[in-house]
Image: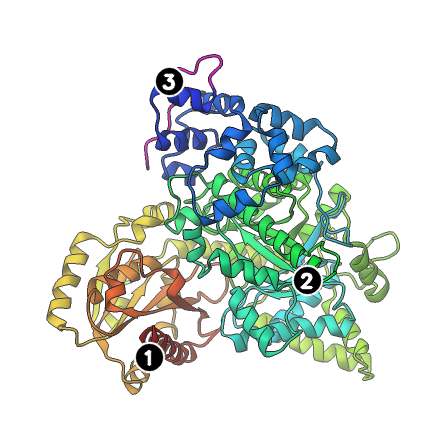
Amino acid sequence: MMPAVRVHDVQPGDDLFTYLARTGGDEVRRRQLIGAANEFKEGDAALGLAAADLASRTAARRLLAATPVGRIAAAPLFRDELWHALAAGLDPRAAAHVAGWSMGQLKAFVLGADEADVHALLPGLASDVVACLVKLMSDAELVALGARLFHPLPGRRLGARGYLGARIQPNSPTDHPDDIRWQVLAGFSYAVGDVVLGTNPVSSDPRSVAAVEAALWDILVGFGLQDTLPHCVLAHIDVQAEVEAAAPGTTGIWFQSIAGSDDANATFGLDLARLRRHARARTGRWGLYFETGQGADFTNGHGKGVDMVVHEARKYGLARLLRADIADARRRLGLDPAPWVHVNDVAGFIGPEVFRTREQLVRCCLEDIAMAKLHGLMIGLDVCATLHMDIGLDDLDWCLDHIAPACPGYLMALPTKNDPMLGYLTTAFQDHVRLRERFGTRVDDRMWAFFRDRLGVVDERGRPTRHFGDPVWVHLQLCRARGDARPADVIAGEGRATLAAVRARGVAIGEGHGDRPWDLPPALDAEVRSLYADARDSLRAEWHPEFVARIPAARVLRTRARDRDEYILHPTTGETLEPTALAALHVLKDSWSGRHDTVLVVSDGLNARALMDDDHLFPFLDVLAPELRAAGLALAPDVFVLAGGRVRAGYAVGAALFAGLPGPRRLIHVIGERPGTMHHAFSVYLTAAPGAAWAEPRAIDHDITRVISGVADTAYSPAAAAREAVEMLLKMSRSTCAQ
């Protein structure tokens, strides 16, 4: 952990810049002072940007509050192409109007002025100014700000005062269309789902993405909702563009994760120019859907010595810029310029290295709601937690109750709090039902009419009917909408059989409810809690010696993580190898004399059981080796087994063995995924690059790596994953050679 920031000897009349001039501070010190104004989070502490104590935090805030807005805007904490584009995109009149105000005066204005007057100034607020502004606010002030600024999507009540929408997230461990379809039907049965049907795909292969798009589109067309509710497959934006080019009109709103700097966006395989080209092409009904989250920048090695709030604010600045690009493109075509653009803050997905407690999760969500709204954006939240954070199932209810008054536009919606593919905790359909009851929020009017009049799952007063929580009933209505005239009991029986198959694949879908409409059925509640308990145990699992002994030619290496606690709480220790391990690899490289062009690494990751379970690793290896030989690839005889290994530890192995060697060199890294599902799944990370690239620091990273996830005997079969891995490696190698 880096040293904490101490702030003392603040004199009356000091602002940030006069204090630095008087005390001899430099740019590093300025970043520290701005970071110290934050509420405490583990991520800032890891960067050496957290205040040492309350007195230091208070002093940092005093300095920031006294600083002129214009000075903050004109002196960015780091400059890159994105910052220059954001600065150029500001409304100069609005920016000039507030430039002479202190940050404290700006805070008083946004909290107290008429909403229309605040809206008029928002286009002139630089992202760094917005970041500094929320640092000055208490949780209660952030809630108050969120509850007075609204930016509904064009022509709808989504994001409006009094409305709380939902993105149904129908993830499948195998991208199975039935898994996806039945989660949507289940959501509709609880009168949930009015913002987007958005699936995270297991495979980013365009064919697979197209199949998922088709499953979602089929439901919308069947119910006649294609002009009411968009669908989305959360693949890379380039893949979505490829699918749309191959089958025009089949994609809905396009998705992309975005970062707050050029370097961090490069880890997503993106640059600003490409993002802006995609934005200017989105002139149809649906625009763009962005995902962000505090901590992603520094955990990918691009923190730049700047705190997480500043990076997050710049993401909203990028979303605002791209929304303006869409509006401009629509205006040029003579269309209504208002674009359908929203952002989803995935707060809590990374883990305890960013923040650990429910209080920090709430703070993060409140900050991000405020920052997005101050950028003029409609924002939703994924109020979520990984299984290795100090946040449990019941804690999420507490978090939601503290966040909902800040009026996010929407929340995630799954059949239970446990995502069946990603293995993390988030909001269930039932949470939406409870929040609607407690806070009096509404679903967008068009979808509410559909739930009430077409499906009949709620009545005129908004109360549940006998069909509430009955996905088989919704399936029957879909069949009838398509003209299926078979007897109702035949269709229902078919539906129940399909639903049973979905559940057998590890996708928990409830029917009905408990004592209250927002309670999970008791049996399903017990199942979810059992999965949670198993996940907590799995996080602590370590390699069994007898298992490692069964791996052919296993060579065990350790990372710098001394134990599971350090591995979980300080991820960088699991990304680098022990010096003795590196030395051993260098000796081995010399003995190989470049004969082997492919290396296999097996890591425990966040769940060693994912590899040690029966019929997981060994069926994968049994197919992988002969397939590699048949493809003409020279697999090294050693299998490198990492204890306390993360994805980047695999890159470290590849760099030690391949640096400077001629021709393409390939890494296959098998690693245990986050626990939390019945599958104990593992992933396969594939990297192919010339030996020269393996020799360059950070040249090998996630942006050139492809992944096959959800591999388990109960999900995507290990044998099929092995065959796909070889096929993908060959394709990647050809691309590498062509460069």
Q: Please say whether residue 147 is visible from this viewpoint.
A: no
Position of 253 compared to 737: left or right? Answer: right
Position of 572 compared to 201: left or right? Answer: left
Q: Please say whether residue 291 is visible from this viewpoint.
A: yes
Q: What is the secondary structure assignment of the residue under circle 3?
A: helix
Q: Identity of the amino acid at label 1?
A: Leu
Query: 535 above or below 495?
Result: above
* N-terminal-most mark, 1 or 3: 3
- Residue 590 placement (x, y as % from top left): 11, 68
Which residue in the structure is indicated by mark 1? 624
Which residue in the structure is indicated by mark 3? 22
Q: Which is closer to the viewer, label 3 or label 2?
A: 3
Q: Residue at x 39, y 52 (%)?
A: 300
Q: Which mark is residue 286?
A: 2
Q: Residue at x 75, y 46 (%)?
A: 160
The colour scheme applied to this rendered structure is rainbow
Position of 620 compared to 357: left or right? Answer: left
Q: What is the secondary structure assignment of the residue under circle 1?
A: helix
Q: Quadrant of residue 45?
A: top left
Q: Is residue 728 magenta?
A: no
Query: How far is disc 1 from disc 3 in space, using C-alphas?
Result: 64 Å
**Residue nearer the viewer, 559 or 250:** 250
- Find the magenta span and give its range: 2-14
Query: 140 above or below 195?
Result: above
